[in-house]
Image (spheres, helix red, strand yellow):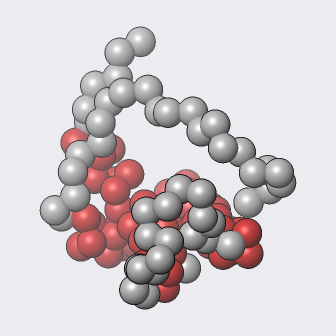
Amino acid sequence: MEINLDHTLAIEAKAMVALAFRNGPIEALHAGKPCAVCCGNPNVFHISDEEMKAMMKSAVDTLYRLLWQRENDSAAYLENLTLGERYTMQWDDPELKKPRKSGSATKDQNP
């Protein structure tokens, strides 16, 4: 089945990403200065296991809350999407290609 771009769904997806990731713990990591020694070196860990777990936990918690609101409290859901849209007005629309499979799974698959 071919995937077509649905602009309403794209706006919703971008808003959810802004709320679940951009405005989560990753923002604190992004706010710092790049390491002059290891910047760009793929052999150096840039995010600790604890930081990654915190980011994924925050994203799951936020996405669950948003999905719950979508099903049970549409007014709160739309209010949150409106907030998320404020961050994403200039973001690119989704690309409609198959997602890449990550070949670098960690030893512990838990978020």
Task: Identify which residue is drawn at 28% across, 53% down.
Answer: 11
Vertical position of residue 44 compared to residue 102: above or below = below
Give the farthest residue toward the front. 37
The reply, left or right, for residue 79 in relation to residue 49 is left
Quadrant placement of the N terminus: top left
Q: Position of residue 105 (x, y in %)?
A: 71, 45
Q: Quadrant of the C terminus?
A: bottom right
Q: Is residue 94 left or right of residue 16?
A: left
How many numbered callouts? Answer: 0
Residue at (32, 30) in percent of width and height: 96
Q: Quadrant of residue 95?
A: top left
Q: Is 83 located above or below residue 33 in the figure?
A: above
Residue occupying image coordinates x 38% and y 51%: 13
Residue 60: percent from left, percent from top: 64, 62
Q: Nearer the viewer, residue 85 or 105?
A: 105
Residue, x 57% and y 70% (percent of image)? 46
The answer, for residue 72, to whether it is visible in the render is no
User: In the image shown, does 53 or 103 lie closer to the viewer?
Assistant: 103
Question: Percent position (x, y) of residue 85?
Answer: 27, 66
